[in-house]
Image (tube, rainbow, N blue to C red):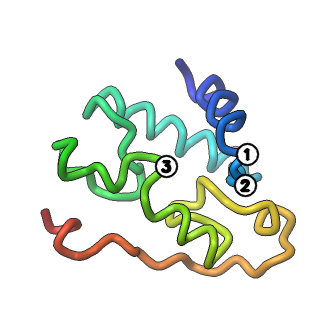
């Protein structure tokens, strides 16, 4: 599957849940390509904006969509890497703020 195919598949699954892809298609496709590279590298689609450990058990929280997506989108309108956003964020009905890292330091440091 290529990034366009992943886009179509995930869009159909995520939009009904209220999660939209960032309207900046260059950024979105680049992030999806990185997810596919991580799937080849690790065997799972680790978030491209975080350093994966390479061990599924240690990276479960950052497999896209990561466990931080829901609170990020709820609070900021976008997830940490900006792949998933709310409809209001895409429509610029809410301010685009920098989303802070929610992943605990101990997970980042491994």
Q: In what element is the residue under mark 1?
A: helix
Q: Which disc is residue 18 wearing?
A: 2
Q: CA distance from mark 1 to mark 3?
A: 13 Å
Which is in the foreground here, disc 2 or disc 3?
Answer: 2
Q: Give the residue number, with chain letter if any, for mark 1.
A: 15
Q: Which residue is mark 3?
A: 65
Q: Quadrant of residue 15?
A: top right
In the structure shown, which secondary structural element does the residue marked by tag 3 occupy? loop
- In this figure, what is the number of numbered marks? 3
- Is residue 49 found left or right of 9 in the rendered image? left
Residue 56 in which image quadrant: top left
Pick out the residue farthest to the left. Answer: 110
Residue drawn 66% across the image and 36% down it: 13
- Residue that extends furthest to the front in the rendered view of this protein: 17
Local secondary structure at mark 2 = loop
Residue 66: % across, % down: 44, 54
Report the Cα–Cα distance between label 2 and label 3. Answer: 13 Å
Percent from the top left, x then y, of residue 33?
50, 35
Q: Quadrant of residue 73?
A: bottom right
- Is residue 42 left or right of 48 when viewed as pictured? left
* Marks 2 & 1, CB-CB < 8 Å contact: yes
CB atoms of marks 1 and 3 within 8 Å: no
Label 1 neighbour load within 10 Å: few <14, some 14-19, many 20+: some
Is residue 57 or residue 97 the one in the foreground?
A: 57
- Please indicate whether residue 56 sits to the left or right of residue 48 in the image: left
- Residue 86 placement (x, y as % from top left): 73, 62
- The answer to which of marks 1 and 3 sits earlier in the sequence is 1
The answer to whether mark 2 and mark 3 are in CB contact below 8 A is: no
């Amino acid at each position: 599957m290529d990034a366009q195919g992943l886009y179509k598949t995930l869009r159909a699954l995520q939009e009904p849940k209220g999660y939209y892809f960032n309207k900046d298609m260059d950024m979105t496709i680049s992030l999806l390509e990185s997810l596919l590279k991580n799937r080849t590298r690790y065997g799972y689609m680790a978030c491209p904006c975080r350093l994966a450990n390479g061990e599924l058990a240690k990276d479960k929280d950052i497999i896209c969509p990561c466990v931080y997506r829901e609170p990020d989108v709820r609070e900021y309108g976008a997830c940490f890497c900006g792949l998933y956003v709310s409809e209001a964020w895409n429509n610029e009905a809410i301010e685009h703020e920098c989303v802070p890292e929610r992943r605990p330091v101990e997970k980042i440091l491994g």
